[in-house]
Amino acid sequence: MTVPTLAFTAPVGPAGAPLLVLGPSLGTSTIVWEGVTPVLAERYRVVAWDLPGHGASPATSEPFTVGELADAVAAAVAEPFAYAGVSLGGAVGLELLLRHPDLVTAAAIVCSGAKIGTAEGWADRAAQVRAQSTSSLLIGSAQRWFAPGSIAQHPNLTGRLLHALQDADDASYALCCEALAAHDVRSQLEEIAAPVLAVWGAHDEVTPESAAREIADGVRHGRAVGIADASHLATVDDPAAIASALRDFFDTAIPED
């Protein structure tokens, strides 16, 4: 196992404002946060990162864990920060809270879980991508990712996200699947002391309400909120609702200087 190299966007937002780091979902890139970032950047200094072999991050052939993704984020940021992540990016957020509690002031875990799916399911997905490429996932991903009507409402962004999936490095994507296969921090949630917001989308069958409530109930200071018109990529389906929920949470959760 190894700590992978990740690419980060340049900060946007007021100089000297609290730092907020945004994490992506599997198969996407930093663009999954595009509709939300402008609102967050009114109050915070916002950066986002890409998974290995996705977006601007270099591909890798070396296995890694979700915890090692968290270590890579922590090493690159190296200052206290708030965090929000979608799906795999949310799983990284939980690992950040566990492995680097001195760095993370608060975290929003969006459409994610302390465990996501099954090890067998992720192994099958990894094998499919190695054999048939990420292009073989396009139809299924579009069905899982977006709420009814979302593609018609956001044709440009949803199209770019599906292109990002198609452009993702096959080997790196498969390694992300294998990292998720081993991800399970359910027994460790009670160790997390920082404030946590767990967000679910009402149409999300990948990480439904029960996954968010498991996180919120398991950590020491957690709460959960649902987004009615969203599926797995809630930041795309209803960016205004996500931005509002995150602003409300971080405005109270992040300590004043």
Image: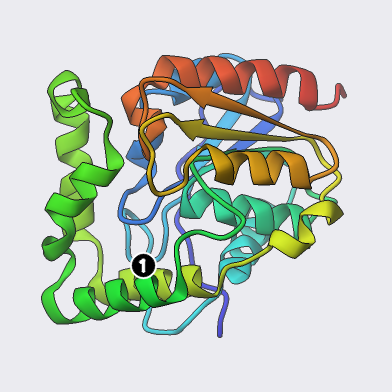
Q: Is residue 33 left or right of residue 90?
A: left
Task: Describe residue 7's horizontal placement relative to residue 170 as left or right.
Answer: right
Does 72 sit left or right of 256 as displayed? left
Residue 113 place in picture, x, y as percent: 56, 51
Badge 1 marks a residue whose secondary structure is loop
Taking the image as drawn, is residue 74 in sight?
yes
Q: Which residue occupies 62% across, 61% down?
A: 70
Q: Position of residue 112 (x, y in %)?
A: 52, 47
Task: State the count of labels.
Answer: 1
Between 257 and 205, the one lying in front of the other is: 205
Taking the spot 18% from the left edge, 23% from the top edge, the residue there is: 149
The answer to which of 188 and 252 lies nearer the viewer is 188
Q: Position of residue 156 (x, y in %)?
A: 15, 28
In front of the other: 133 or 183: 183
Residue occupied by mark 1: 58
- State the colouring used for the structure image: rainbow
| Left or right: 190 as drawn, with respect to 212 | right
The percent coordinates of residue 62 (x first, y second) are 44, 84
**Front residue of this view, candidates 23 and 189:** 189
Location of the C terminus (image quadrant): top right
> Label 1 sits on what residue type?
Pro
| Quarter of the figure with the N terminus | bottom right
Q: Residue at x 18, y 19 (%)?
A: 153
Q: Quadrant of residue 69?
A: bottom right
